[in-house]
Image (cartoon, rainbow, N blue to C red):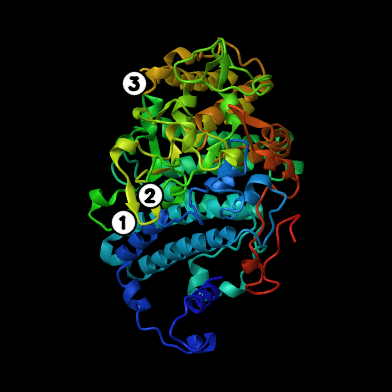
Amino acid sequence: MMKKYILLAACALGLSLSSCEDFLNYTPTAVVNEDKAFSDPEKMVNAAYAMLGDCWYTYPFNLFPYGDVSSDDCLKGGSGTTDTGYHAFDIWTTLTATTPGEMDELWYRLYVAISRCNRALLALERNGDQLGEDVKTQRVAEMRFLRGHFYFKLLTVFRQVPWIDEQVVEDNSYEKVSNTALNYQQLFQKVIDDFKAAYDVLPVKEPGEDGRANKIAAAAYLAKCYLTLAWGDGYEATTGEGHINSEYMQKVIDYTDDVISSGYGYLEDYGDIFLPVYKNSKESVFAVQCSDYEDDNTTYGRANWSNMLNGCWQMWSCGWDFHKPSQNLVNAFKTKNGLPMFDDYNNEIDYPINGQPTSQKWDPRLFHTVGMPTFPYKYEAEYTMTTDNSRTPNTYGYYTSLKEVPQRSEGETYNGSWQAFAMNDYVFRYTDVMLMRAEALIELNRLDEAEKIVNDIRGRAALSVNKHISYAKDQCEIAQYPDNYFTSKEVARKCLRWERRLEMAMENGRFFDLRRWGIASKTLNAYFLTEQNDVYEGQTYGQYYKDAHFTAGKNEFFPIPYNQMYYIPGLYTQNKGYE
């Protein structure tokens, strides 16, 4: 899994060697001696932390192509369907183990991150006493948290993965570990064990203290793990309302109790959540820390390279116009008497135009989430969007994503042909955790408690108009659900799922939600039928969705990349439905 990449990279880069065989016999000179590296466990820990943000658009650790492009929330974007390999994620029918190459990069880079965690654990085992017992114990817990974090991403995307821990490193037995040695539930238990080890040791930290792992972040992750497992095994035939594990749902409640009792909470204005100045506010339970080079005095800064493609076309020096909100998502923000239009929201295409209020009203979170022609870009009138701010409107339309970018007036991190943003990547924000809690409460028949959480979130949205989007005030209308509106699980689920979609829109997890609930095929195949008829001011787009189809029993997970399958032939087994 590791050695092959080193070899291929060396050959591809054309090192001054006559052949790959020469490389195998070459003694590297710029290599840190392992014993020397392990002698400084604190630096090994820092190296593991550094992997949190060691991402790139071809292996985005925030998983935006896997969780959003694959869903009904957005279209891929870019210069056309061949721009990157992510078109297959958009339509599913062309997704195979050999395409795109980006899946292989993500697999590899996540295992590089896990390798650093494992080596830090070995360094702490061998030489951690120099740090003192308390610090050593805490650092071990932090490394197990980080390892759990990276494995959670692997399980989320690829499902059946090999479990490589510090003992495998110690034994140098990588090439003997099959991806079927542990089943899906057993793999998840390993991840849960890592987060539980962190939860039992790490301190509770107040918002903004630093970017280290802490007890509350571990509690949020444990809740997420149990919520995922509580619905089934991920495949639609064995996932959904008929497969609820109430014991696991109670675990979600137990661990979110810790988050509630901490110093974290709802940030008062929804728009502030996505501005850099508030990046470590009480809303941020755990986030990957990013920075600008002017702030940290480095050449490139610690930018969020996962989102480098997602800037608005011609708004930034280098905006590549990926991650384009769908018309279906825009329609989902429609309200009637302040409540969602559950049954007829998508009957016709509609969109607000600045300065032209109509009888159709909108949830205010639309204007914080989706950039639209005629409206200020990220609240700034001097940067108002037009139809010129779309790279390929005949393919991907005119909307743009707002949450992952700063305001244009704040300047930009621009280097050569690339754009980068110093925006933290939320792993968990408080509202996300509370929505997970509400989801579990519903399944445990505690409907009134779930309704209060949803109404609290809607109440915050109602107050998020005057500060940033006053220009859209006459177009906004949102209300809380009347008392006892959650009369049954069916009604409560519908409201909760709608709320989760609007609140967390374009935050890289919509497809994973649909999969967890066992409704991905129904939702996406209906979406493909309507989204191919998109039109904005006479411009049609989205017609490529005529080739899209989601196959239940196969597409719930992504295929094991071809290069990994044949790293050692026969060692790994492909996911169901893929060749």
| Amino acid type of the residue that numbered disc 3 sits on in the rendered structure | Lys
Relative to 292, is 166 above or below?
A: below
In terms of secondary structure, where does tag 2 sit? strand
How would you rate the neighbour count of disc 2 (Cα within 10 Å): few for under 14, some for 14-19, many for 20 or more? many
Q: Give the mark, 3 or 1, whose residue is nearer the N terminus.
A: 1
Label 1: which residue? 300
Closer to the observer: label 3 or label 2? Answer: 2
Quadrant into which the C terminus falls: bottom right
Q: Is residue 545 visible?
A: yes
Horizontal and vertical percent position of residue 299: 27, 58
Distance between the alpha carbons at the discs numbered 3 and 2: 27 Å
The label shown at residue 391 is none
Label 2: which residue? 420
Horizontal and vertical percent position of residue 364: 47, 21
Distance between the alpha carbons at the discs numbered 2 and 1: 9 Å
Horizontal and vertical percent position of residue 322: 51, 44
Label pair 2/1, CB-CB below 8 angstroms: yes
| Amino acid type of the residue that numbered disc 1 sits on in the rendered structure | Tyr
Horizontal and vertical percent position of residue 28: 40, 83
